[in-house]
Image: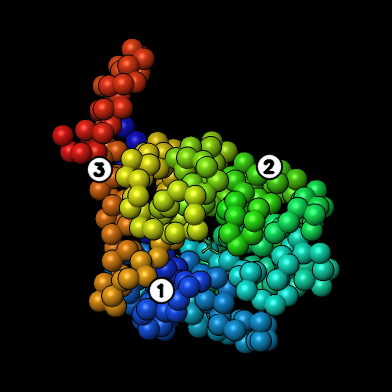
Amino acid sequence: MAKNTKYKFCFGPWNISEGQDPYGPTTRPAQNFDWKLNALKKLGYDAMMFHDDDAVPDIDSKSEQQIRKEAKELKKRLDGEGIAAEMVAPRLWFAPQTIDGAYTSNDPKARKYAIERSLRTIDLANIMGTNILVLWLAREGTYLREAKSCKRSMEYLVQALDKMLAHDKKIRISIEPKPNEPMDHAYIPTIGHALAIAQLTRDANRVGCLIESAHCILAGLDPADEIEFAMTFGKLWSLHLNDQNGLKFDQDKPFGSTNLRSAFNQVRALERTGYGKRGEYVCFDVHPFRTTKVEHWLKHLDNSRRTFLALVEKVRSYDEKKAQALIADRNYQDLDQMVIEHLLGK
Ligand code: XUL
Ligand code: MN
């Protein structure tokens, strides 16, 4: 029997958020990076994920030299704590230059800015000791169809990906698809789209994906199937587990909070395909509910991992033989009940 995976866990500084939403201000006071790193250590997590400006605040106003200096200091700090940097991602949706998109903006100056910032993020990833660049293509889409051409946008995207791949022969790009929010429609809404565009680049082997449970649900897809699909291509290099209650704003709820059975199936997909065996991390892109008090601020992270580990046990104790017999008999009625009772602990 293959050895069980020992999972490694990760979250980002933005996952200790303050509760702001479009209708109201923060409900918890902001904490600095040291506080968040301490919290990550205290919770027993293994790695942190970073946007470029999580690693080097106000990155756009700093010189290359200053950026390198701060990144090296951060790396030293992380090494001292025994914490890895899982990935770095350019935050391409915040700057005034990217109001109408980054790589697919209609403005050539914006496209140039986006590519240059991405190349700088790759340099940052190198200093931080990770070869994973995550691209959540936040504003690569439109509010209205007539504003851009999808075909032209695909060409821009491939050009940008090619520049990144040429800049560094070791970097691996993990595209994080999401179908909407902030855009009406995004150009890379699913894993299928991400893996298809990878094929058009100069080195398809170094363009893979990151699956976020909530993003799959927003696309009307089953996260477990998306996981097995990406793993079939050997392209799932990172993962954002969380939960989402149907088609509304991106909720980033604790893992398993809405649909425990779906969470069970996601863990089962990871176990069945050996996710984590090549060093990949299980990251939780979860946020506290706005109502969360300061003293309960880290619960969503601790609880998500607890649920994940409990579900690993559920997957490992699932009666596969009995399931196979029911499948052979096309008795999906009892298979359904068997899963329910297993989850209920019966
Ligand atoms: C947005 C989202 C981001 C990415 C990182 O929905 O999930 O936090 O994971 O840029
Ligand atoms: Mn995410």
Name the residue at 55% across, 82% down.
Answer: 57
| First in residue order: circle 3 vs circle 1 | 1
Disc 1 secondary structure class: loop
Residue 17, image x, y percentages: 41, 73
Q: Which residue is mark 1?
A: 19
Disc 3 secondary structure class: helix
Q: Nearer the viewer, residue 194 or 334?
A: 334
Kind of residue indicated by mark 1: Gly
Kind of residue indicated by mark 2: Ala
Name the residue at 29% across, 38% down.
Answer: 315
On screen, residue 42 versus residue 286, left or right, reads: left
- In front: label 2 or label 1: 1
- In front: label 3 or label 1: 1
Q: Which residue is mark 3?
A: 313
Residue 246 vertical position relative to residue 46 in the rendered view, above or below: above
Residue 123 vertical position relative to residue 131 in the rendered view, above or below: below
| First in residue order: circle 3 vs circle 2 | 2
Kind of residue indicated by mark 3: Glu
On screen, residue 132 versus residue 17, left or right, reads: right
* Crowd tier of the residue under label 3, counting other residues whose Cα lies within 10 Å: few below 14, some 14–19, many 20 or above: few
Tag shown at residue 196: 2
Residue 324 in view of the camera? no
Give the CA separation, mark 3 to mark 1: 32 Å
Residue 277, image x, y percentages: 42, 46
